Amino acid sequence: MGRRADVSLIFYPVIMVLVYVLFRHPLFRDYLMPYLLSVEIAFAALFLSSIIRVTTKSGSLATLVKGAGIAVAVYTLPLVNIGIDYRLPAAFVVLGVTLSAMSSDLPDAKAFALRGVGIAVLLYGIYMASSQLSRVGMFAKPFLYVSAGVLVSYALAALESAGVLSGRFFIKNLNVIVAVFAFYGLYYALRPYVQNSYPRLVFYFDWLVLASTVLLAALAVQNYLTSKNLENYLVGEWKRHEFKLSFLGDAELERAKSSIEDFVVRARKTPLVIYLTHYGRILGEDRIRSICEPIIEYSKPCLSSFTPGWYLKRVERRELEKRADLVKRALEEVEKALEGGR
């Protein structure tokens, strides 16, 4: 990374010299000179970004300088007559992408806040561009509503991540919250058209939007409550399966209990693998590897955030039983191997 940045300190000035030569050449001067200021700003931003990356090792600041410079370069482009002024909207889009990219290196709370601002700025840029188009101007409003929705929902998620708000409702349901804002944005954009062109359908249109919003909200609440209570449910199910390990002595079971519960209830493999490796250390590397392999290779099925609660519990119960059986077989293998070695 450092070498690439060092090379860029030479690369950008050399390229800029070549740009000056090309732009001032008689064959291209009349066509390219209007773009020279934008190119100068863009390369200056890239050069300054490389200097910051080398001297301060701050990737976020370097990204901000580069993105802001390119946004300004886009804004200073000469206007081409295509029916809209694309410069400011494009600059907003570039700035939004830059802010979103910067969030990847930040802690969770700051990442949610900055990504929310970045996405909101990007969507506002799209709103500015689409609002200038007469044919699709009516569809510009949804981008404005979604932009506001992203800003609010990501801010609340940032507060949850920082611990200011309790729970994880907004973090777990960001997509559906933004979808509700988008849905209502589309509704307010289309309703005047429906009212003028199809007045008899307005009633059904309103109820469709209301019912869809209630359904999305119900799914979000159900997802939150289900995930919140799922671990308690699984702990209860696990208590019913502990008898499967009754072949272990009380002392061994007590030592293994925490690691086993971590795997069976929460699918955390590491504590159990460490325990089995320690417990069966006299068996040899190959033997203990074959015992631990089924646990290491186990993976939970991927379910959507909005999987119905009843089905989620069914799948989790089935997987819990599978994990309990894996543990039972692994401990039985350890016991057999130890007894055979005595």
Image (tube, helix red, strand yellow):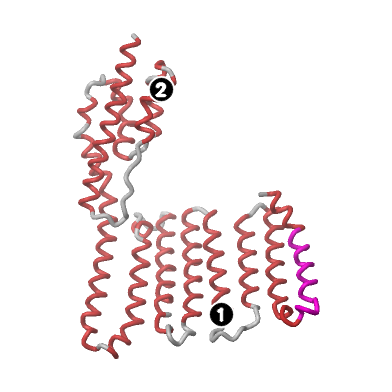
Q: Locate residue 105, reporting x and y percent.
A: 54, 53
Name the residue that disc number 1 marks.
86
Query: Which residue is more in the foreground, 111 or 119?
Result: 119
Name which residue lies at 32% across and 55% down. 305
- The quadrant in which residue 86 appears is bottom right
Name the amino acid, label 2: His
Dot 1 or dot 2, earlier in sequence: 1
Q: Locate residue 159, reporting x and y percent.
A: 42, 59
Q: Secondary structure at mark 2?
A: helix
Name the amino acid, label 1: Tyr
Name the residue that disc number 2 marks.
278
- The quadrant in which residue 50 appears is bottom right
Residue 169 placement, left or right of 7: left
Q: Which residues are magenta?
A: 11-29
- Mark 1: give few (<14), some (14-19) or many (20+) Cα within 10 Å: many
For the C terminus, the quadrant is: top left
